[in-house]
Image: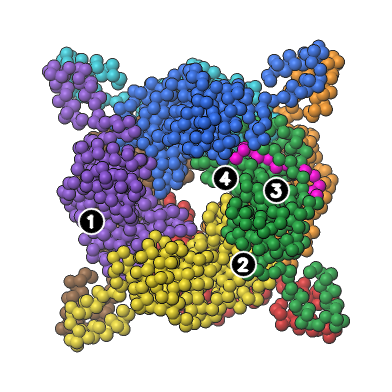
Chain colours: A orange, B green, C cyan, D blue, E brown, F red, G purple, H yellow
């Protein structure tokens, strides 16, 4: 309820066309609905102009399905992240149009495929093992209405592979870069392009990678100024931020 | 040198108007110039469409000045970050138009004030002590051609202060949020707006803040999906990324 | 044995009604009983005015049951925390009135439901995934004689959900707030109310949450002054401290 | 503005005694005032029932003084924490009644000495070196209207010193315990009493104390259930929470 | 080979009773034997005056058995630590007299029960869950020829349990203290006695215990001066060092 | 394509024997081939003079096999690291000559056994449990054309075992040292020899070894100047670097 | 007050030679004395059989001197650790016989030089830079009545220096080993001798030594079983524990 | 003393030309000399074939000078690392030919400039601020007899600067790469060349660089296989290892 509506409401109070109790009730009315275990917020799409997303971890297959169905009453696109195969099976038999991506463990209902992004989003991975995280970013960006160009396995130890994709990178309006181990790819990509780079450290590696900490620290300390970072393995967040950037 | 130029060069080789050695030389020619202690890259502005930036730490006042003057041969805007007062004095007596900002320790030469950003950038700080970092972001965004709205001291423990600035926040095309201690402000701001939020953890705090680590971890784990993070105290990086987003 | 009893004992010694050896024995007598693998302390209830609690981890189902039965010889309320389902089955078949809460893995025998708390305790969770920890706090506070108001899924990224519950929060005499990821909720709640807030970081999250470390550090650095913190996932401790506060 | 006031306001709108613009203005009116570098919130005292506190770090002596004076327009008690001696000098010459405590670096204006606490707060330190942190807790609790009993240097390696103070501890309604090094004192105190214990890790120690981390972790893992923890060296926070507990 | 033997050898060389090649061979001869996957050192018992110990982790049941049998050709006492039940089964069917302790996962062959220790070693645990580590210390100290007094579940939150065992503690010549969570027990015990205390942090705990790190740091920072520390869960090492101390 | 080839190409352009489009195409041609999920780089052998290596983690058995077969079209030696037994089975039934090493989980196709190394590489392990890492180093060094001398179980707590192998160590041209726990062996070996030492921390240990962190830090701080370090458990990397050193 | 005294007291009560109030008073009487800022415990010498020690950090020169003088009323030996030169000057002009050791910053009053230790204590340092910590250990052990043999600069990278001191090491009854950087020396010494080794990590090093953390972790993970560890730079603690061991 | 000498010695014993005591003495004779505060080892040059190095930190100017002069009795080249300007002044007035390098704080006496290295060593820095560390590596490699090519300021965010130096890199026989912040340069260089790369993380950076930890972790996790790592800021160690590699 913005100020215009508020003014209108109060004018109605003054005019008597709305009585005080009704006005109080409307002021108190906030558009979410309580399922008991989670507040479902149908207006989030309005607030964010974005589809609804369900974070799958720590929720049962039943909870995920219930929330998804409720959301689909009001929205055409729903994204469920981090769903294990059993949950995916359960959801797919109950939610029409639910597609499962085993690598990233995402479930997507993509009913409205309107293009919202103004340009192309490139989603880049440093190595084959980083693809699941990149896939999560790609699925997210697509369901939010973007054209996505995926470029895989162009890590910095074979810099010519990266240089060969320079042109494709320079065509993107925003770039998501997923890398584990030393996490150096965002710095190199960032130096090659003039658009924003969203860096996603992945937990790929072993030993002193400390489950993605090495890549995370590397990306936070990038000597390229056009790099911002999201959480380890957070392909969803990167795809989300990239989509917002591609809309503005 | 893009493909068109390369093709043209090779056609000149074929025609004989450029001989092989000259062609090799041109292929090898990259537009940077060597001052001995630093490669100065005049084309970075072209590549990034951005002014040149000098990271002041670890450089002498003489080095900073020399690089700045060389850059100003080709550019109208130069930003020097993390310059101590002595360096600022030295620079200001030798570089015309150099303005010093003691809180953020930035020096700015802002000769070309063309507006490049398409909308407004909001730069928000959680507390008074975070203002120096916010100032660095603001100065950066301004010198890169953006209108900046600064909103200070609206941390989450007094949520009404934040709510009172909701409208100003919602007018921004991208928001930079600087916060130390628990670093919670980006999550709350992120939930209120639908634009990208660039979060800057600051080193403000003590004890278990571990020089900004607490705020950094908090921001990386933000439950708001539209938040990306830069390094601790990296106001410059946040202003830079926000500027790129505001241009696309 | 307090000073009065000590004085009385010594007067008996002086009068000869208690001889020296008996007096020494009584001085040495401390009211706990040795089961071999654990000291069971029946007087703890007196000392703390609180029911007995068994920490379930690292104890076999048999050990848990034996201790519980022995305690129930002297007490009406027993709480067992962190009991896996197999232990719960074992206990429930042997201990009358034992109720199992699978989400929080708590077992509760709640024979004496006297209300001790002077006001209401609110137990708040930031997200659905934090509910198990909140449940442990709720169960603890209830068995210690408190009225508990549970408010779930009001995390900071949807601040209106929190604002809508402001009134319920302000009615509490002490508030337990459970949050994972960035752990920002206690700061915002703390700023809204004037009562003590006990913050519980949860291990919900991934990547740079480092199993709750991010939330823990965030809460320790809260810019709200009325926040104190317990261990990660320690719903029990929070419910316990809140109960003590509600009694004083 | 609570619901009653809101209802009253809207009835006035209906009756015409308040016009729509005035109503909107009142709804928008929030009682803080902008000094440019900090939002000063005069209603915080109302919201929290507490005096205003200025966190001294990162603020100039001028800023601290300006805020203090503005606050003293509306309040009788002001506490400034972490003020260095130069700031203290500056403040004391400009703010009437400002008392400086060099050990804890606190400045206190204590105009209204009404007793609000229902019982006594004990403030305990493990060693002589922990006294500055304990002093900050004591000063805070006193200015918030509590009787404070300070007990110093009763660390666990000389357990008889602690046992000798058992009676004084058991008279307190809430206890603040400050300890560095291994931070064991809150666990032992917590086991002796049945009231809430607020533990403050201090940065006293060297080597593997890691500036208070060892004590912090120890307190978070306390085997006494009645212990909650605040940030390293945060005597203020402990005194604040203890005061709230002592009021409820 | 000590200097006397070396002198004798060289005199034999001079006299011609040992020729140069034989002397070189003897100089090169060191009393260990190579099983291919491990050097078995029969003289270690001589060097250390101690039984041979096999660290079970990372070795197959076959390897453990082979080494144990080879050692038992020269020694009467063998201790195998960290053996899983399957390994224990395998060993017990092949090595005569092998006793298995499931809690600590130790296997002991204790053929020679000569008492070497000059006094009694007390092995103390803070809680029931710490008993497996304490058991490893006890078994080690026993097989090395010591009388061991085990005192369990006397953690600091119930200080009277500890005080009641004060006399037993003061009879020990050296004390091993095992504690998890905050690891405070060694400090309190250390303050009560005048003998050396070997502290063993255990991994018992959760959340901010970080698998024993909290207890480890606590013990390293003990304010009792008579405390030295071994690795987390290293009951064996503590029993070993305590045995050496009890022999000197 | 080096400068000579570039010059030749451009001379052909000038002469007209190669037209401009063909020249551009050749300039763009980079010798790798895209399998969809991984860029296979046949020229890496040329660039590095080394066999191709497949990092097994995060790849399916099918992916590993496909890449291996493709590589074997152009190379005689292929090394697959970190392959679980199921993958090994799958690969061995499809790739001729594939040998599996269960301890190190490496698969090796070793068709070309030319000796490239100029001297001998010693691969040393501190304890039996470190052998798998040492084996990975040995297999790597062998497939890269080196003679390897393996010396196991000569850890620093039995320094005579090390001293007895001094001669073998001094014959090596480069030494790989694998050690877990305190990771002290590289320092001692480094002090005994004058050749480069490549240190590999292993994750062997428990408690405060923190999965190899203790050994890693120890090796990085070696007081022997001839020690360089690779990642925890990275036997492959150590064998690879040692092979390069042995070739130069 | 031990049981004998307690019995005697109670017999006096029974006989009437001590009345009840006097008995209560004596039971309450604990032999320490309160200076206001520190409890001075004159019976600690009895309890520990040890001289009194003042930890200098965080105490003013005046406080140190006052405590020292009070202690010297009852004791002949006092040790002050971590005293800066100004404090030392102040103390030396006021406390007779106070000797200052600038390297370790210790002040020692050594009036009673009775030998209590049964054998010799060796204090070993790995490098010249570790000597201050070793000196603190030596001074402590001496003032506690031990003969100390100091052996410096025998770090593991020059293992022959250590081997040359083997005989001196084997003559010690207990050995203190101080080492920074990788902290490997205790493991090697531990393997050479059969007596207890007290390891002291020092903060000597840089970079990944993390102020002694690397050495600390190394020592905790020692593969020599006869090693126990004290805090970083805690020469005093090592000397203290070694002295206790040498007495038993 | 190698086996040949030992055989010869023992033959002399047999022949009677050396008597037993003299033989024992020679066996015991190890060529180092004791200055009291440090063992000076004149044979290290023989053992390592390397000049003597003095680690300057923690030594007084007098100590450094004394050791240097003593070493120069037997050697022509001496390197002193980490010497502050005052020490440098002191040394330069007393040691002939001592040259000081203020950036790296190294002092070098370079009397014997024989070339020992077989090829060229490239020393590379990512940014201007990394030059001091690179300089230490260069000075070390030079004094050890190597031709060094220094290439500065070619960090990965401007990849064309690196590509332009590709040829110079490929001419090196071993490369030292110094980089702070994200530490990505060694991976990219490692992918471009086929020789060993010694990576040196520098402490350049701020915030989440954690004094070089980010760069260190990045380098340890390098996806280029030819990279080995030394301690943070350890230019000396890198130059030393590179020199050894260049000699083999």
Residue F86 in sight:
no
For discs 3 and 1, the disc positioned in front in the rendered view: 3
Residue B139, which numbered label? 3
Find out whether residue B125 is within the magenta segment: yes
Report, in whole angstroms, how far the alpha carbon at label 4 lies from the one at label 2: 31 Å
Q: Is residue H22 left or right of residue A148?
A: left
N-term-proximal mark, 4 vs 3? 3
Q: Secondary structure at mark 2?
A: loop
Residue G148, which numbered label? 1
For discs 2 and 1, the disc positioned in front in the rendered view: 2
Count of labels in the image: 4
Marks 3 and 1 close (CB-CB < 8 Å): no
Report, in whole angstroms, how far the alpha carbon at label 2 lies from the one at label 1: 54 Å
Chain identifier of the residue bearing label 2 in the image: B
Q: Position of residue C82 (x, y in %)?
A: 49, 35
Marks 4 and 3 close (CB-CB < 8 Å): no
Report, in whole angstroms, how far the alpha carbon at label 2 lies from the one at label 3: 27 Å
Q: Secondary structure at mark 1?
A: strand
Can you say whether H201 is above or below C124 in the image? below
Report, in whole angstroms, how far the alpha carbon at label 1 lies from the one at label 4: 47 Å
Highlighted magenta segment, given as a residue range: B115-129
Say which residue label 2 marks: B37
Q: Secondary structure at mark 3?
A: helix
Residue at 48%, 79% in the rendered image? H145
């Amino acid at each position: 309820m913005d100020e215009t509506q508020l003014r209108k409401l109060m004018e109605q109070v003054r005019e008597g066309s709305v009585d005080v109790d009704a006005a109080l009730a409307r002021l108190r009315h906030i558009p979410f609905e309580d399922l008991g275990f989670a507040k479902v917020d149908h207006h989030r799409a309005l607030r964010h102009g974005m589809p609804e997303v369900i974070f799958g971890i720590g929720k049962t297959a039943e909870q995920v399905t219930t929330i998804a169905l409720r959301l689909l009453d009001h929205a055409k696109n729903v994204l469920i992240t981090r769903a294990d195969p059993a949950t995916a099976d359960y959801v797919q038999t109950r939610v029409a149009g639910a597609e499962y991506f085993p690598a990233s463990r995402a479930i997507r209902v993509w009913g409205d495929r309107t293009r919202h992004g103004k340009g192309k989003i490139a989603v880049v991975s440093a190595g084959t093992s980083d693809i699941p995280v990149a896939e999560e970013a790609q699925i997210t960006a697509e369901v939010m209405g973007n054209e996505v160009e995926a470029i895989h396995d162009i890590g910095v130890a074979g810099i010519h592979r990266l240089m060969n994709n320079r042109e494709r990178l320079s065509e993107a309006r925003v770039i998501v870069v997923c890398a584990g181990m030393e996490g150096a790819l965002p710095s190199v990509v960032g130096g090659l392009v003039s658009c924003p780079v969203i860096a996603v450290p992945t937990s790929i590696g072993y030993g002193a990678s400390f489950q993605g900490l090495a890549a995370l620290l590397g990306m936070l300390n990038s000597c390229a100024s056009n790099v911002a970072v999201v959480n380890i393995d957070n392909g969803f967040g990167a795809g989300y931020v990239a989509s917002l950037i591609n809309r503005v």
